[in-house]
Image (spheres, rainbow, N blue to C red):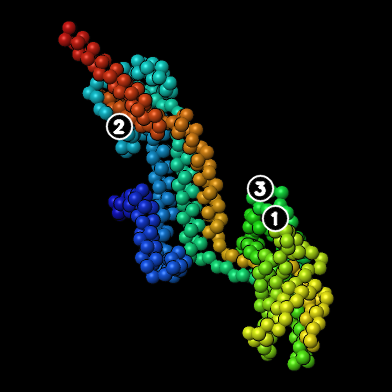
Amino acid sequence: MKRLFRTLFAAGSSRAVPPLVIGFFFILYIVVAFFTDETLITLIAFTRRSLILGAILALIPLNSAFRMIRETITFLGMRGALSGKTDKGVMGMFDEVVELSVPATTPELVNRLAAAGYKTRRSDNYLAAWRGISNFPVRLLFLAGTFCLFTGILITTTSRSSFRQMVVEGEPFPTPNGNGGMVERITLEDSQGYVLRRNLTMEVATTGSGSGKRKFGLYPPSRYSGTFVYPRYLGLAGQLRFTAPDMPAGYEKLCYLNIYPPGKEENVVIPGSPYRIIFSVPEPENLSERYSSYMSDKISFRFKLLMGKDQLFTGTMTEGVEFVRDGFHLALPDVRRLVVTDFIKDDGVLFIWWAALLFAAAAVLWLPIRGIFPRREMLFRFGQGVTTACSFAEGEARKHAGVFHEMLDLVDLKRDERRGMREES
């Protein structure tokens, strides 16, 4: 049973697992590309529906977890060996292991190693030497980042859900659970930052345990009631009133007009009649003022009235002012700002953000440790007439190997001196 567990652990913690899994999905991506133009969307849909594909993708975070365990075991084993507590199973962790059939002269080795900048620890049967800082924390951060990244991808691929709603001033905030409070105000302002040119803010009077006021902007995305709030497009909601000569009863309804940026058109079909109205916002002469009308107190609209495919007439109208022509009456007495918003439930995003932070921390730590303070270690264990010398380096390996072999030459020199003394006697 232990052998089976060790075999599975060795396979699961192999460095070959991530390239094999990524290669598998890359080949699958190429195959899917022969049958559809929406390759990535189709592949994600396959992975979401297939338990086998999901399990294959889960091998990467599982491999990262196993490698973190293996790295920790190796690190603790190396520390135990350098402290003289244990030597069981640690010789294979070193880069180079040499056995010499002669006991070493500890004081001379200590002096030489100290001269080379190594700290030492010794006892009757071992001598440990080291310098620099171990990059074990960096490796652990990198593996933790890999675990979070692919866990996030797995969760996003298999469980992400989204729906699009209109967030309108004066209307309830349309959260999935229906208790989002009331939208009090929507504002669009010029930004003083370096990333976005404008700031969009949706002010909501929330209800429930977290009652109060919340503001939802463009970036970073806010999270509310378990979903991320992503504003997508600007628009206007207007209470449309329309009458025609052959429609004495008229028509009245709240219409959602996704008509920004200016020039974009939105169709409103009058049910039970051949009429259709196309609304748009006039484009300003100065392109820098394209969105100024969005925050205007009185918004002007351009419209086209169609009967079937025939255009009857066009015109402009202002909020609160009725347009009258040839028996047609058209008015938007109440216009409010709206934002077309995506509400996305995706817990995988949190893992991906954590991955970004962990990768950034690993990069910041790795550069000075690897470039200035790389870890280098030596271990000499003394037995009955035998010295076992071990070497390990995470950086500046050639320089470290030179010092290590210098120590081996010193041990050989002492062996030759002892041999000569015996021959003389």
Type of the residue with mark 1: Arg
Residue denoted by label 3? 194
Q: Residue 417 shows which numbered tag?
A: none
Label 3 vs label 2, nearer the camera: 3
Residue denoted by label 1? 198
Quadrant for the N terminus, please.
Answer: bottom left
Q: Are marks 3 and 2 in contact (CB under 8 Å)?
A: no
Residue denoted by label 2? 96
Quadrant for the C terminus, please.
Answer: top left
Label 1 vs label 2, nearer the camera: 1
| SS category of the residue bearing label 2 | strand
Type of the residue with mark 2: Glu
**x%, y% of residue 233?**
65, 65
- 3D distance between C-alphas at marks 3 and 1: 10 Å
Drawn side of residue 369 relative to residue 74, left or right:
right
**x%, y% of residue 249?**
78, 91
Q: Residues within 10 Å of mark 1 (few under 14, many from 20)?
A: some
Type of the residue with mark 3: Tyr
As drawn, 350 above or below 384: below
- 3D distance between C-alphas at marks 3 and 2: 52 Å
First-in-chain label (1 vs 2)? 2
Q: Nearer the viewer, residue 109 or 279?
A: 279
- 3D distance between C-alphas at marks 1 and 2: 60 Å
| SS category of the residue bearing label 3 | loop
Residue found farthest to the right? 321
Residue found farthest to the top? 424
First-in-chain label (3 vs 2)? 2
Image quadrant in which you'd find residue 250: bottom right
